Amino acid sequence: MRKDFTVDTVSDGADETAFVEAYWTRVWEQEGGPKGAVDRIPRKPEFRIMRPYLDQLPKGARLLDGGCGLGDWTLYLSRNELPTHGLDISRDTVAKLKSLFPDSDFAVGDIRDTALPAESFDGYFSWGTFEHFEEGLDRCIAEAFRILKPGGYLFITVPYDNLRQSLIKAFDTKRETEPNHQSVRFYQWRLTRGELRDCLRFGGFQVLDIKPIHKRQGVLRCLHHEFGLSYKWIATQALSALLAPFLPGMIFSHMIMAVARKPVKHG
């Protein structure tokens, strides 16, 4: 597992929980806040991977969207006969979701300690959230295990420590392991597929699948960080779209997605 860092411009040196809330509140504000953009959900790679498992759930199955952000996934699934509880650490974002979508189920909460009843969900999905606590993923995974019913599915994505990233790290002798500037702080963990598999297995889950996803985003980041091309340039966007289908995911994918299951009790 490899640490990524960021400059803290939002929390004024607050503790990690306050920093995570402030950071993501600002991100969602910069994206324009909740809009109910549900039409794009079926086209996302996460949905294509999880759909066969969702189809196996009983009628009326309940899902948890851990770190729901702008709430699009909660809205889409709830409107498609899968009641979904959206949970997020950003109080401002959840307040806006409740105001805009009063018939939907949103609440403020910490995915490390949700205070939700044990064995109360048939499925739990969380996109890019488990990695944002410096203590590691274990508490998030333990809480997911606690609130899932036996046989329930867990779907998560985390940043991928792909082969390109590993090589950059191995040969970058100038990069500090722990930055010492006081405004720079921990941002996220980046994992290999084996590390994510082990975290889930140690947490009691049966790991069913782990796939690299978001290859185009990884190519775009490569063009920016390694070649200095701006994200905003149309040429950069076009080049990433052109190259991504021909490049290997193990080198360029930005995220990995895991599908795991809480074992069924016997006897």
Image (spheres, helix red, strand yellow):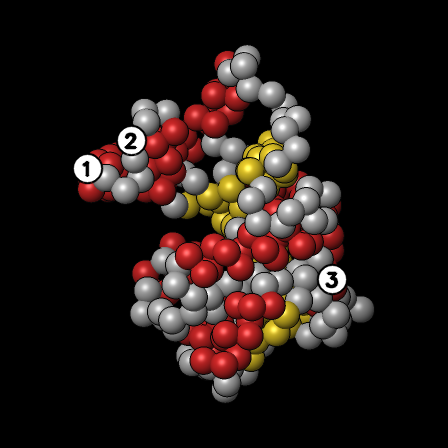
Indicate the amino acid at tag 3.
Asp
Residue at point 60% right, 46% down? 131
- Estimate the x, y position of residue 232 in percent, counting from the top left: 27, 42
Q: Can residue 155 be spotted in the picture?
A: no
Q: Which residue is mark 3?
A: 113
Indicate the amino acid at tag 1.
Ala
Q: Few, some or many C-alpha atoms within 10 Å of disc 1 (few <14, some 14-19, many ≥20)?
A: few
Indicate the amino acid at tag 2.
Leu
Dot label at residue 16: none
- Disc 1 secondary structure class: helix
Q: How many angstroms separate mark 2 from mark 3 (CA)?
A: 40 Å
Dot label at residue 235: 1
Residue at point 49% right, 44% down? 256
Q: Which residue is mark 2?
A: 229
Q: Report the quarter where the N terminus lies.
A: top right
- Estimate the x, y position of residue 105 in percent, counting from the top left: 56, 79
Report whether 79 appears left or right of 172. left
Q: Nearer the viewer, residue 180 or 109?
A: 180
Camera-nearest label, 2 or 3: 2
Q: Are marks 1 and 2 in contact (CB under 8 Å)?
A: yes
